[in-house]
Amino acid sequence: MSDIHAGPAAQPVPIPVRTLAPWLIFGGLMMMLMIYFVGAEEGATSIIKGMYVHEYVHDGRHLLGFPCH
Amino acid sequence: MVGTLLMRGMLVGIVAGLLAFVFAKTFGEPQVNHAIDFESRMEAARGDAPEPELVSREVQSGIGLLTGVIVYSAGMGGLFALVFAYAYGRVGNIGPRALSALLAAAALLAIAIVPDLKYPPNPPSVGDPETIGIRTALFFTMIAISIASLTLSVLLVRRLIPRHGLWNASLGGALLFIVLIAFAQLLLKDINEVPAAFPAVVLWRFRIASLGIQCIMWMTLGFLFGYLVEKTMAPRWLYRPASA
């Protein structure tokens, strides 16, 4: 009877790091790029010329707490 | 399966962004408008011509706000899903629903509340355009310090648990977090660029609205993501029988 456990019948299984790594790197970069465009593009730094992105997301940038002009 | 989690995180992020937008539109926009009125009055008093509008106020406060909040929220949802994918099964015997809720609470604390204590959100007309570089750098530095401190504190809690139990270990972790954040916030440069005549009530309401947006976004992410993962993915893939 030693194979009977009183604890929960199941335990979370971690996803192996080798499976995770490419997602963490490329997915992570893509997500951060999205956040960058809302939060900082055409403010402190600029990839695209002009101020259109900055002005377009202006209210969101303020209300999401990023420094804005 | 990581891809499925990532996609789900982004989709839940979009839902969270929609809810956050409704809140932002209702409680945030009136304060933004008050702040812009203040700016216009200051310009008029100085005799300056008003700045030309590159994007109209209707676009900024409507579709522009919607786009900004949703892109931000989808990005955070994706990052959240990736952190979830790493943390699952590595932070003890916690199911997806509870882990998702805990991670979202941690993110709200580390990404929004703690950085905002030092560098609070500011409405238009607060902030000197000359210092945008340093302000942006300090804001992101504060977020990085906050995330690092919380990670260290969680690691400390896990080390303390075997000898001191969960309650005391958590108190130890909380103490470390508070000490680290207090030091960082004492040492980092202070910024106060609020114009002397700026209405205090507008500033307060704007900042509370901003905090509300973050709360709604992270609560939606935490609860909805965990619910979806638990319901659709857990039985087949996330669990293994303990006796195996």
Image (cartoon, helix red, strand yellow):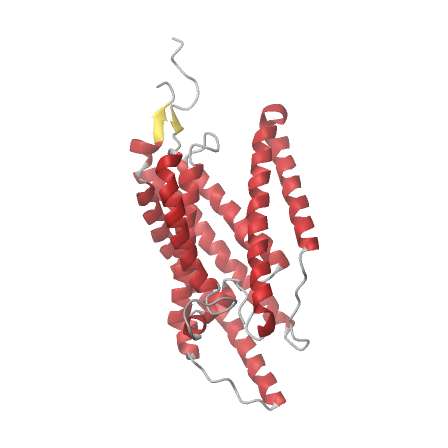
Against A48, residue A23 (above or below) is above
Identify the residue at the far bottom of this view: B47
Left or right relative to B107: residue B70: left
Picture quadrant of residue A16: top left
Viewport quadrant of the C terminus of chain A: bottom right
Query: Farthest residue toward the top?
Result: A1
Residue A49 coordinates in the image, percent (x, y): 42, 73
Residue B148 seen from this side: yes
Which of B12 and A37 lies nearest the eye of the viewer? A37
Task: Please tell me whether residue A61 is drawn above or below residue B164 in the rendered image.
Answer: below
Question: What residue do we see at 55% from left, 73% from top?
Answer: B124
**B75 relative to B188 in the view: left or right:** left
Q: Quadrant of residue A21?
A: top left
Q: Which of B44/B206 is in front?
A: B44
Q: In the image shown, does B164 or B28 lie closer to the viewer?
A: B164
Q: Quadrant of residue B189?
A: bottom right
Report x, y in % for residue B75: 40, 55
Q: Determine whether B103 is above or below A46 in the image.
A: above
Q: Position of residue B177 (x, y in %)?
A: 63, 43
Classify residue B64 as left or right of residue B138.
left
Total count of labels = 0
Picture residue at 49% right of the left edge, 59% below the top: B213
**Which quadrant of the rendered structure holds the N terminus of chain A?**
top left
The spot of residue A50 in percent (x, y) is 43, 75
Specify whether residue B227 is in view.
Answer: no
Name the foreground residue: B202 vs B130.
Answer: B130
